[in-house]
Amino acid sequence: MITKRYLITRSIYAIATTFVAIVINFLLPRLTPGNPAVTALATTYHYLPPGKLKLLESQFGLTNAPLYVQFETYFWNLLHGNLGFSFHYYPETVTQVIAQHLPWTLFLLGTATLISSFLGVVIGRITGWMSGTKGETTLSSIFIALTSLPYFWFAIILQLVLAVDLVINGFRFFPINGSYSVFVTPGVNLPFIISALRHSLLPLISIVVTAFPGFALTMRNTMVNLNKEDYITMAKAKGLRESHIVKKYAARNAVLPVSTHIVLAFGYIVAGAFFVEIVFGYQGIGYVLYEAVTSQDFPLTDGIFLVITLTVIIANFAADLLYAYLDPRVQLR
Amino acid sequence: MNDLLSIRGLETVFDTKRGTVKALRSLDLDIHKGETLALVGESGSGKSTLGLSIMRLIESPGRIAEGSIILHATEDVDVTSLKGGKLRRFRWKKVAMVFQSAMNVLNPVMRIEDQFIDALEAHDIDKSEISGRIDHYLKLAGLGPKVRRLYPHELSGGMRQRVNIALALSCEPDLLIADEPTTALDVVVQKEILKSLNTLKKQLGLTIIFITHDISVAASVADRMAIFYAGRIVEIGPKEEVINRPRHPYSKALLSSIITLNTKRGQDLISLKGNPPDLITPIEGCSFHNRCPSARPECLKYKPVESLVSSDHYVECLYPIGE
Ligand SMILES: Nc1ncnc2c1ncn2[C@@H]1O[C@H](COP(=O)(O)OP(=O)(O)OP(=O)(O)O)[C@@H](O)[C@H]1O
Ligand SMILES: [Mg+2]
């Protein structure tokens, strides 16, 4: 049950976590030994151009002012969406770069999470119900194998087999990489949307296929164990139909541990999505992070870490609400 | 005698790694229409197994291996052979049960009223009638309509037990099996629940099988009393008869221990030495001979058969007390 009190405490908790994340993100580059501005310049110059160093330092917000003053400036800038300039994408700002690429990742992550949760619950419900049969044991073994595949490896295989090799009469079914075709103009128009969807298909499949079997297995195992629960016996005693018992008693209760699993797996899905983006050259945050790290683009890596942290915090907040909605027993503890 | 249920030669077994546990050993029992029959016996004697067998809720590793459970309705049906839709309509409508594990039989994610509604709908109760029925039976069990919107975790143990009773009655069954419905509760609540069960019985003409450890509870609710030992009924008869003139040495030991110790659960057999027999190995002779204070050599060799000792009072012993 989502009560007002629950909502308020959870929000306070989320806000507090966010603040801690911001503080850590502020402190980290300042605690690392050496001067990040110097390090940054040293990769491109053999000497330190003094003008550039000053410029960089001010962009990092590195001054000799006391930490709390620096933090105030940093926080103020952050509130205004100002995270400095990206080196790699100069003259674009970090915020601009993130704003351009984040939607792609959010789309990929969101869709992949939704589809794999849905598939996990639905398929797990079926395998849980027919547990013990030959078909089910085979399926569950396949699922166990699938969960142990690394995302990126599976992505590479998919790319090779379905994108590179699958060409019939000169027609390529799946694009090899990128987020959309160069022949379409980004915006709200049909060719672009179709092209974007086509490009997202293989990345999506890579994540979903490696993520959902784990959820399905949890769902199955929980359903099997729930069969021994007294309320299932009671449901049978009441003379309810099997389909009703599976739906309203077994599956409904099995969803609770599955949702915990999904929430715990979210971090892995994020990481997996990043790898998959890199494999497919899909222009999301993961791809940009890769570029930023390889080109030592400190402001951009910093900004991206902040965004990732925020995404996870928001996802956890949403999960808390979902829990409370699904399980009436969830209250403040 | 007008019987509602006739059980003949019932054998319910559990297949375990050690072997097959015979929880009910060729049990015969007639349940009269409108009576309250108390089943008394120590832990593991098979009382719940009997209740679950009647409800056809024995599941793997258990099974009903042998015997019949005849329900005398408009025509006689053998409950052990019911399947599919017939079994569904039999459950809760003909026989309902208040389970021993009362705390966990309610679905934690469903509101109380929804747990009534699905049962009532499954038995084709008219939609317009459902809401009234829920209120009615909750009230009979001593609960207000407020609990309808609550979830199980919001109820106390006593309230949950009342919900279970109301739920079991809501389809107006012919037979109610109440398996230790008051064991988990304190004495005051226990008394209230027993009182409302008694009222209900009078109002509805219900037949009740009341399973309990507690002879004093059995004495207050029962018309007849059956003493269970190692998967069989060793003595059955009118309550006063069995309590005041027990004829089986086991009944006597059981009763005297209760009366002298005024027991709590688990202590009730202090005066009886030894353990009940292992239900895996076949039992030779009388199942009670190893603990019986008045056992004779024949008790080891011959299986006792049921004999009538006074009106409607049967005992299964070669040498019943007082003969
Ligand atoms: N699922 C099971 N698997 C194996 N043996 C079982 C199972 N359920 C019951 N039994 C056995 O059947 C016998 C009867 O058990 P039952 O639960 O009917 O006893 P009871 O008289 O209800 O005891 P209590 O008073 O403790 O509730 C016991 O010996 C028990 O070990
Ligand atoms: Mg029991």
Image: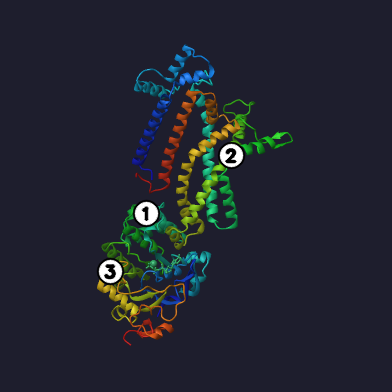
Pick whichever, A127 or A325, lies toward us.
A127
Residue B45 vs A150, above or below: the answer is below
Which class describes the residues within 10 Å of circle 1: few (<14), some (14-19), or many (20+)? many
> In the rendered structure, are the residues bearing label 1 and label 2 in contact, judged by CB atoms less than 8 Å apart?
no
Between circles 1 and 2, the one closer to the viewer is 2
Q: Residue at x 39, y 17 (%)?
A: A63
Judging by the rendered image, the residue that carries numbered circle 1 is: B152
Disc assigned to residue A206: 2
The outermost residue toward the bottom is B323
Measured Cα–Cα span from mark 3 to mark 1? 31 Å
Q: Residue at x 58, y 51 (%)?
A: A141
Q: What is the three-letter code of the residue carrying label 3? A: Thr
Q: Amino acid at mark 2?
A: Ser
Displayed quadrant of residue A316: top left
Q: Is residue A45 above or below residue B304?
A: above
Q: Nearer the viewer, residue A77 or A300?
A: A300
Q: Position of residue A5 (x, y in %)?
A: 33, 41
